Amino acid sequence: MNNNRKVRVAITHGDTNGIGYELIFKAFEEPTMLELCTPIIYGSPKVATYHRNALEIEATFTIINDISEVQDNRINFIPVFDEEIKVELGVPTEESGNAGLLAIDRALADYRAGGFDVLVTAPIENSEQFHFSGQSRYIEDHLPAEEPTLSMLVSEKLRIALATRNLPLKQVAESISIEGLTENGRLLHHSIRRDFRISNPRIALLALNPKAGDNGLLGSEEQEVIEPAIAALEKEGIQAFGPYAADKFFGGSDWEQFDGVLAMYYEQGLTPFRSLTVEGGVNYLAGLPLVRTAPETPANFSIAGKGVADAMPMRHAIFLAIDIFRHRKEYDEPLGNPLAKLYKERRDDSEKVRFAVPKRKEE
């Protein structure tokens, strides 16, 4: 790939009855967006035109048939299916959900071929009509990671990772373990260093039980699982702290002292994130070779077709994906070109001349 070209951002259209196209078109109403990146929309031109007309949004795009035809300074559009589908704005259907998955499938195929740099996905929701485990799991299943992944919520001031994902509350306690939390903390630490370029991040682990277990009166998971995991992370040189009761942690200013937070379950992380994020919340899946983000939107079908969807989360999802892509290149470049050995070879090993360089401790 040409390192001098703009970052190529693939964007999938999401559920065709939702707010995906509204978010995309509104995000690129700002002319400077095309100066920042080269967008490639994966979707249906017919459906896109329907949304554009229904919402009375002025949006232009150029249809291309192959990733090799992508050009800068325009919105490139790759059709992912030819079939006619019924558009019912605000109504989830199996057909509209599957249309979103077809866009992901085509995008991942182009990514494997080196066609773009980062992926941003518009919303697809689980419903009675379309049973779906989530785009993150779908992408994980179709694009295996070299290491475990970690779901994160990111805003300008907050990074909250989830130790468990989409579990009934009664299953959370039995799903967390010392090994699992240690691995999650390790992944969060590495992601903040590599993806966000914070050299020595401070990480907070939240408690599972009310009042952080109240010394075992309200639960033993803090003493038996979370505290040992924190100790294990500290032994690895990771600045890990806690466990903190979520109400006090987010009710005051404690959260501002940390670069990352590990929540034990979905609502424990999502509720304060939405309360403290003014605009532009983003979902990020750390650990994948592909940088993938998504706008954090609390509503999808309920506002579809009404023209009231806020495009700021989509813009921030694009901004974050580009930032992480560039940060990874900065982080990985020195590792790919290590310094040569600091000695000169002579006729035999006994005559090696070594420079006096103190050996750094392993981090």
Image (cartoon, rainbow, N blue to C red):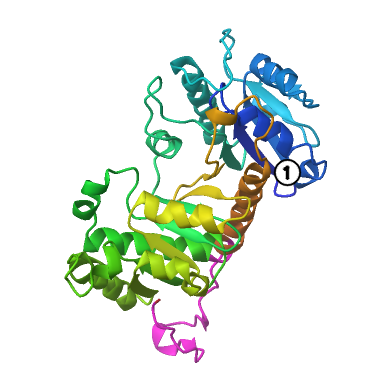
Q: Quadrant of residue 247?
A: bottom left
Residue 358, relative to residue 2: is it above or below? below
Q: Is residue 166 visible?
A: yes
- In the image: residue 220, left or right of residue 111: left
* Residue 111: % across, % down: 55, 35
Q: Is residue 63 visible?
A: no
Prevailing secondary structure class for the magenta stretch in the rendered image: loop
Q: Identify the magenta region.
A: 333-362
Is 336 included in the stretch rendered in magenta?
Answer: yes
Residue 19, relative to residue 318: is it above or below? above
Give me the residue at 50% from left, 60% from top.
159
Kind of residue sitting beneath label 1: Cys
Q: Nearer the viewer, residue 17 or 159?
A: 17
* Residue 328: % across, % down: 57, 57
Q: Quadrant of the image for the N terminus?
A: top right
* Residue 129: % across, % down: 40, 19
Q: Nearer the viewer, residue 14 or 180?
A: 14
Q: Quadrant of residue 178?
A: bottom left
Give me the residue at 70% from left, 49% from top.
3
Residue 290, relative to residue 305: is it above or below? below
Residue that extends furthest to the top in the rendered view of this protein: 84
Q: Which residue is mark 1?
A: 37
Residue 142, relative to residue 100: is it above or below? below
Residue that extends furthest to the bottom in the rendered view of this protein: 356
- In the image: residue 162, left or right of residue 118: left
Give me the residue at 51% from left, 44% from top.
290
Helix, strand or loop for disc 1: strand
